[in-house]
Image: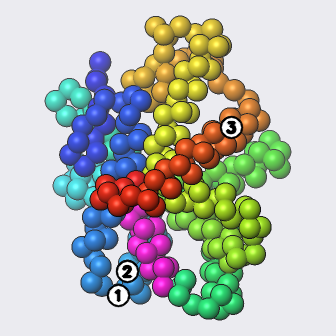
Amino acid sequence: MVEFTVVNFGLFFDIGFHSLLFEVIAAIGFGFIILSLLLKISSKILGIIGLVIIFCHNLLLLIPFAENSVLKMVLAPLFSPIVIPFAGKAFIMGYPPIPWLGIMLVGFATGKFFELKEEKRKKLFIRIGLSALVLFFVLRLVNIYGDPVLWTTQKDSVFTFLSFMNITKYPPSLLFCLITLGILFLLLAFAEQFNTTFKKVTLVYGKVPLFYFVVHFYIIHILTLIMLFAQGFNWSQFEFATGTFGRPKNLESGLPLWSIYLIWIFVVAILYKPSKWFGSYKAENQHWWLKYI
């Protein structure tokens, strides 16, 4: 039997409770390192490089590399998830860094837009957001390029719509970037008009994104274990080696979608006070390590 281990740019971790957390942080860390090396380049050029990555990285899937070609072995881990057999083990690169780097470069370049006057910035963000959404629907209807998962006609209109919206996040496909970033730009366009209380609440989380991510990661997986015990499973039935965070691979488990939304709201709510406390702690203390959390 092949033993599975996760590789994160040179760091090896057993698949299980921590692998997803490390992979996400590793991909973000890789992006920040590359960005730091490119800071002398103008933001406009960085934005163009980011857009080229976002629009073109899905092309790699269409290039007919020879199965064991050196070029494929070098490029594939940077652009798409890959399993690499080695010495009786299989190393998994689940979060390829280049697609996420494209988003980071575009985001960095967008920072210049916030120096514009409110009305001009609002019009620009609306144009960008609507253009991205229109392009998303055009490319998705054409159903040729932009996402490795093509949509298909299903048994009814609801499931056909779900197939249409079933786009790839890992790594983020062009279509995923268009619809998520398009919606984001529209939200930014109208952010100044949001209710003051709503803005204050969201700012609490926005000031401590990594803190929130790490803490919520552990909470949701502890809740998963509690759910499994409540559903009658015992520890010996839990599966961690498959990346399911304890859920038995061949046994039915889980909760209906409506309850998942309730749990999501619950986790966000209980992390409000800790996030607010940590945000205040960061503001009142100048420890160097706080800049990274």
Q: Is mark 2 on a helix, strand or loop?
A: helix
Q: 26 or 114, which lies in front?
A: 114
Q: Which of marks 3 and 2 is in front?
A: 3
Residue 92 x, y percent position in the rendering = 32, 39
Residue 15, picture quadrant: top left
Q: What element carries label 3?
A: helix
Q: Name the residue under label 3.
A: 266
Q: What residue type is labelled 2?
A: Leu
Proximity of marks 1 and 2: CB atoms separated by less than 8 Å = yes
Quadrant containing the N terminus is top left
Q: What element carries label 1?
A: loop
* Magenta range: 96-112
Q: Name the residue under label 2.
A: 46
Q: Is residue 269 magenta?
A: no
With 145 as the anchor, is 126 left or right in this view? right
As drawn, 31 above or below 111: above
Residue 91 x, y percent position in the rendering = 27, 37
With 170 as the anchor, is 270 left or right in this view? right
Magenta stretch, main secondary structure, is helix
Residue shown at the point (59%, 68%) measured from the top left: 181
**Badge number at residue 252:** none
As drawn, 142 above or below 21: below
Q: Is residue 100 magenta?
A: yes
Structural crowding at the residue carrying mark 2, measured as other residues with C-alpha within 10 Å and reported as few (<14), some (14–19) or many (≥20) = many
